[in-house]
């Protein structure tokens, strides 16, 4: 079938809306008519670095309506409203033990550009196009494996919910599934974009005592306060990682925080997130930090601290995303305050606004 899709042909070039051919869904696959899709920072990175073979149709926070199902699909039916999430095989030991984000085929299925059988569904003439995260949801239609399609209540306004498939899932899951803090614990969140703010909202739901937001943008810190941060730090005037850590310790009676979460991928920030920890504290890193240097004995061993990587909030999306929706419906997870809508034709503007910080979570409207 012929569809419209935003195609990334080359690095550091604008994305173009073009005609694309999409194959029929195969075994265990679902064809989804897209309503909207969130724009994640990982989509922007893929236009600048080798995240997936180009040319490709990016997009991996899709929301839409099931239009057709392939053989073997029983979890959704034609007409169902679905959120799309990341790809996993469902068969390896990590998937079967409840850690699909760590699937042994995660890199192949999400960044390899092909589907589970190794073939592609998107084409322009004799040129095959890659998908992204097993989706390619910057398009009027997308094919996903049945495991990536999560059914939601059709009474919900579907256009809001795509970002739950990645960004909001990642931030909230880091706190709720990985850290699992107790009442009275403290948390520092470095970077108050969509992922960081999701972590702050999750922390508030868990009644964490101190929730400290760190950023360089006052407007984002103001929103962080509205969403649950008890304290905020504008780090733009703090020259060293130790300065940020000292500011956090001043808020926590000199102890430091029990948990810290770096969503920025900036090496100095990651280091600050370690230095800000209390004894036996845990620092989680979500973003892709390229180079990180620290004194292991002074920064980690002497205070028995932990540094861990967190992928996709270590969640089981089929279980966790409905929980986040239920919380949002009760006003406990008001992610709608982070969102700005753009038509698909303005995808490049949405990327620019996301990079500049003027928009926290762009959502591209494809068909309302």
Image (cartoon, rainbow, N blue to C red):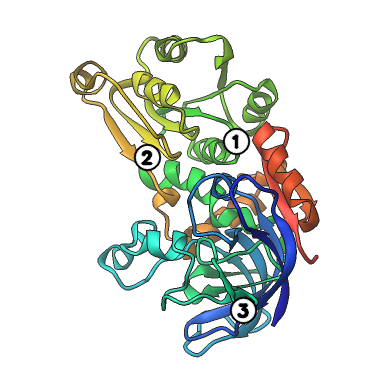
Foreground: disc 3 or disc 1: 3
Which tag, 3 or 2, sits closer to the chain's start?
A: 3
Identify the element where label 1 is drawn. loop
Percent from the top left, x then y, of residue 245? Answer: 41, 15
Which tag, 3 or 1, sits closer to the chain's start?
A: 3
Q: How crowded is mark 1: few (under 14 residues within 10 Å), some or many (20 or more)?
A: many
Q: Quadrant of the C terminus?
A: bottom right
Disc 3 to disc 1, how far (Cα)?
A: 31 Å
Disc 3 to disc 2, how far (Cα)?
A: 36 Å
Which one is in front, 29 or 355?
A: 355
Residue 116's quadrant in the figure? bottom left
Q: In this view, does 105 lie above or below 141?
A: above
Percent from the top left, x then y, of residue 225? Answer: 63, 26
- Which residue occupies the extreme front position in the image? 126
Q: Can residue 158 be seen in this view?
A: yes
Residue at 58% across, 48% down? 11
Label disc, if present, on residue 193 of the rendered structure: 1
Which one is in front, 271 or 186?
A: 271
Percent from the top left, x then y, of residue 322? Answer: 55, 61
Disc 2 to disc 1, how far (Cα)?
A: 19 Å
Q: Name the residue under label 3.
A: 31
Q: How crowded is mark 2: few (under 14 residues within 10 Å), some or many (20 or more)?
A: many
Is 338 placed left or right of 52 in the picture? right
Identify the element where label 3 is drawn. strand
Is 258 placed left or right of 156 in the picture? left
Residue at 36% across, 30% down? 291
Label disc, if present, on residue 179 of the rendered structure: 2
Q: Can residue 338 be seen in this view?
A: no
Is 50 placed left or right of 2 in the picture? left
Residue at 47% across, 86% down? 27
Q: In which quarter of the image is the N terminus?
A: bottom right
């Amino acid at each position: 079938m012929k569809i419209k899709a935003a195609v990334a042909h080359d690095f550091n070039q604008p994305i173009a809306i073009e005609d694309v051919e999409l194959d029929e869904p195969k075994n265990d696959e679902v064809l989804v008519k897209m309503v909207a899709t969130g724009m994640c920072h990982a989509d922007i990175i893929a236009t600048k670095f080798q995240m997936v073979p180009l040319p490709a149709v990016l997009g991996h926070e899709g929301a839409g309506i099931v239009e057709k199902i392939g053989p073997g699909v029983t979890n959704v039916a034609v007409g169902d409203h679905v959120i799309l999430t990341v790809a996993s095989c469902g068969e390896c030991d990590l998937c079967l033990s409840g850690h699909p984000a760590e699937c042994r085929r995660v890199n192949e299925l999400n960044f390899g550009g092909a589907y589970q059988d190794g073939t592609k569904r998107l084409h322009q003439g004799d040129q095959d196009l890659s998908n992204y995260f097993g989706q390619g949801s910057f398009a009027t239609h997308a094919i996903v494996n049945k495991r990536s399609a999560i059914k939601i209540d059709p009474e919900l306004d579907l256009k809001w919910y795509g970002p739950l498939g990645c960004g909001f899932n990642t931030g909230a899951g880091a706190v709720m599934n990985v850290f699992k803090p107790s009442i009275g614990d403290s948390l520092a969140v470095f970077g108050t974009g969509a992922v960081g703010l999701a972590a702050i909202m999750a922390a508030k739901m868990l009644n964490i005592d101190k929730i400290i937001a760190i950023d360089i943008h006052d407007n984002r810190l103001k929103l962080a306060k509205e969403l649950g941060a008890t304290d905020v730090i504008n780090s733009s005037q703090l020259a060293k990682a130790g300065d940020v850590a000292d500011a956090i310790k001043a808020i926590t009676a000199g102890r430091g925080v029990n948990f810290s979460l770096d969503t920025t991928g900036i090496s100095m920030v990651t280091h600050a997130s370690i230095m800000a920890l209390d004894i036996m504290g845990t620092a989680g890193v979500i973003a892709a930090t390229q180079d990180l240097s620290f004194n292991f004995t002074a920064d980690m061993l002497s205070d028995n601290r932990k540094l861990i990587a967190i992928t996709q909030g270590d969640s089981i999306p089929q279980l966790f995303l409905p929980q986040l929706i239920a919380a949002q419906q009760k006003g406990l997870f008001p992610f709608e305050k982070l969102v700005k809508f753009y038509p698909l034709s303005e995808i490049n503007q949405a990327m620019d606004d996301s990079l500049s910080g003027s928009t926290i979570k762009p959502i591209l409207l494809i068909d309302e």
